[in-house]
Amino acid sequence: MAKLREYSNQTVIDVEDGGNGIIKPEGRVVFVEGVLPGEVVDVRITRRKRDHAFGVVTERHFDSEDRIEPFCAHFAECGGCTWQYLPYPKQLEYKERFVADVLRRIGGISEPAPLPIIGCDTDRHYRNKLEWSFSPTRWLSPSEIDSGEAVDDRRALGFHVKGRFDRVIDIGTCYLQPDPSNAIRTAAREIALRHDYSFHDPREHSGLLRGLTVRTTRDGEVMVILAIGEQRPDVAESFLHELRDAVPRISSAFYLVNTTQNDDNAPHTVHHAFGTETISERCGPLSLTIHPKSFFQTNSSQAERLYSVVRDWAVADGSQTLLDLYCGIGSIGLFLADRVGRVIGVESVADAVAGARENAQRNGYTNTEFHAGDVRALLTALGRPDIVVIDPPRAGMHPDVVEALIRMRPRQIIYVSCKPATQARDLKRLLSAFYIVRIQPVDMFPQTFHIENVVDLRLAT
């Protein structure tokens, strides 16, 4: 295999939990993007590892009967979606299987079998937050390159090309977020071009306009956050006011200045330009305050279903102490606050903790407390809760947190995860003191291979 770069007439035998198809030329595993089981393709190897490789399709000979035409014109190059060629019911079938496979392969967990996956009512316009990037060198399609015609202005506002930090697709219509998301992006591009503003170049680390974040709520509130790469607050203010003139539905606007070489906007101060300083999102009985930097599940309707699973599973009669780890703005703990005697939330991001306290007050809960700090450091001081709800980042829990939970011995742990692979790793260790009662996959991200999973654990006696 080491000498070969291409393989012909390869049959795809499966799809793995990262969304890639699998072929096995000469008995070696090759992961191939954008293919389905049963398809026959020619593949060029692009990257090798010790025991596997990655490849791309150079020619298709036979398509799966499951394959459909992607509905988005940008799908071939855009990194926003990965599975538009697969019908949504089939996506759910694969995701349900992925959860079972990952738990078995990494965690050694074969029982109980996952419950049927909870899918979305709609597989489009489901996101409440999108982040767009400005670029001076938009991605040229193969047809544009083949035409040989000169492109005088390559400034773009859209998503990054798959695997490219320095190339952006100039998006026309995106199906991920409801209106007026597309109108805002289109107007922002027109304003930028009309004023001949420079777009940020990540290679040269120069240019005024860097990014545009759009947040929407179920009740139609709209927040925009403009990121600029130069100390030009006057331009940012003017830009945002013109944007509101073009799209009057914008109810809240902010800007931030990021002159670093890092696209992470979290450390930078946001400045209020106009409108409300927050927007409000409904989640079951809760009304949640969303600040510019608030973390909330990006699929609001599915977040409610996800939290309802946790609420229904919690073994509570109103007297229990619930520990909400990685609590963010407090949404899960508050969703259960009326079922327990006390909620203790822990989160490392101080702004999120301030938001959690604000949301507790807003919803009238006085039986809650939220602490900012490292989860590992705080756990030992919190005593023994009856119920622990965990919703960690994709990396899962630090081993010290897992060990602390084992020593703490709560009667119930409900583990919510956005990456079943790291969840399975943590569960393998937790099973030394707990046992699994049930497993519930929940789809939050149609058109992608990402999946949320909830696991109900009880203390072994």
Image (spheres, helix red, strand yellow):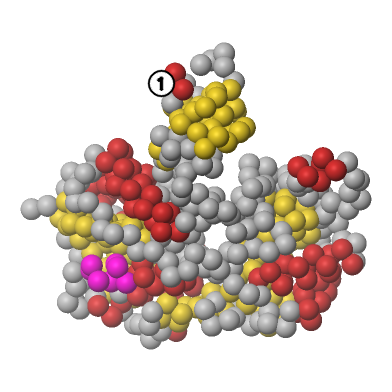
Q: Is residue 458 above or below residue 50?
A: below
Residue 108: quarter of image: top left
Against 376, residue 224 (above or below) is: below
Residue positioned 43% across, 54% down in the render: 91
Residue 46 vertical placement versus 212 (above, below): above
Q: Residue at x 79, y 65 (%)?
A: 189
Residue 416 as seen in the image, left or right of residue 137: left
Residue 83 shows in the view: no
Q: Considering depth in this image, is 205 or 455 the residue closer to the camera?
A: 455
The answer, for residue 301, to whether it is visible in the render is: yes
The quadrant holding residue 181 is bottom right
- Image spot of residue 95 (x, y percent): 38, 51
Query: Residue 341 or 396: which is nearer the viewer?
Result: 396
Of 12 and 175, nearer the camera is 12
Query: Residue 387 appears at what percent x and percent y?
Result: 23, 64
Figure check: 191 above or below 76: below
Q: How many marks?
A: 1
Q: Residues within 10 Å of mark 1 (few under 14, many from 20)?
A: few
Q: Which residues are magenta?
A: 308-314
Which residue position holds label 1?
27
Residue at 67% across / 56% down in the picture?
73
**Where is residue 362 drawn, in percent x and y?**
44, 84
Q: What percent of the width, then of the height, locates residue 198?
A: 86, 56
Residue located farthest toward the left when viewing the structure as drawn:
461
Disc 1, SS: helix
Q: Is residue 286 magenta?
A: no
Residue ID at (34%, 82%): 366
Query: Which residue is outermost to the bottom?
Result: 364
Amino acid type at circle 1 is Gly
Tell me which secondary structure the magenta stretch mostly adopts: helix
